Image (cartoon, helix red, strand yellow):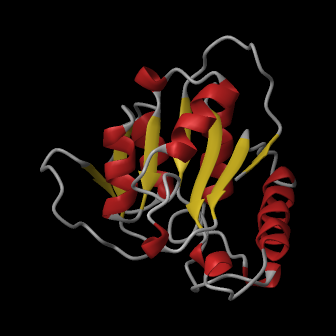
Amino acid sequence: MMESRARRGAKKRPAVFFDRDGTVIDDIGYLADPAGIAFYPGVPEALKRLQDSGYLLVVITNQSGIGRGFFSEETALTVNLTMLRMLQEEGVSLAAIYYCPHRPEDKCGCRKPELLMVQRAQADLSIDMSRSWMVGDTDKDVWTGMRSGLRPILVRTGKKEKGDLPADVKLCDTVVEAARFVLGEGGV
C-alpha cells in the first residue's frame, strides 16, 4: 500500500529509504495512536539536510498490526499522515510512505525483506537506485536494501538487530550519523 505525493515522468533522482519504527521514530510496538509518535533526536534536521542535498525521502514500513487486527488501515494512515505533518512543520517533505499491512505468515511480496515496496517506489518516483540508500534498524531493512540495489546502513536505534549480515554493512549509531555518512561528511 502507498501514500504518495509523487510526480511521474520526472528525471531520476537519488533517494534515501527509511524504516519507520526504530529508525525514524521510537519503536513502541504496534503504534496505533498518533500521540505516540516520537522522533529520535535530530532526525527531522537530518532528513531536512538530505532533502536539501537533493535526495528524495521515502519511508517503507512493515505494519503487521493491521493484519493482526490490532488496528485498522485507517488508523495506520492517520499515524502516517500525522508523522508526515510533523515533518512538514520542520520543513521536511517525504516523497512517499509505503507500508505492508500483512502478517509475516502471509508470505506477501511487500513485507520487508521482500522488495515490492521498494520496487513500487522506484517506479512511482523515478528513483536512481544506483545513487540511493536504505537506512533501518534490523537485518530485514539491510537485506531489503542489498537485494534491491540500495546501499544499506544499519542504525543502532530501535531493535538493534545485526543478524547474519555481510561484514561491510555500514553501522551508524543514529539516523543523524547515517545522514552525515550519506552526505560524505565522515565523522562516523
- Up-down relation of residue 74 to residue 13 (above or below): below
Front position in the image: 129 or 71: 71
Asked where in the image residue 180 lies, by quadrant, the reply is top left
Q: Residue furthest left?
A: 167
- Up-down relation of residue 160 to residue 46 (above or below): below
Q: Is residue 66 left or right of residue 135?
A: right
Q: Is residue 188 left or right of residue 1?
A: left
- Please provide percent x and percent y for residue 131: 45, 23
Q: Is residue 4 left or right of residue 14?
A: right
| Residue visible at 34% across and 73% down in the picture | 160
Asked where in the image residue 81 lies, by quadrant, the reply is bottom right
| Residue visible at 66% across and 51% down in the picture | 98
| Residue visible at 40% across and 31% down in the picture | 184
- Please provide percent x and percent y for residue 14: 55, 25
- Count every numbered label the image shows and give the total: 0
- Up-down relation of residue 173 to residue 133 (above or below): below
Front position in the image: 108 or 37: 108
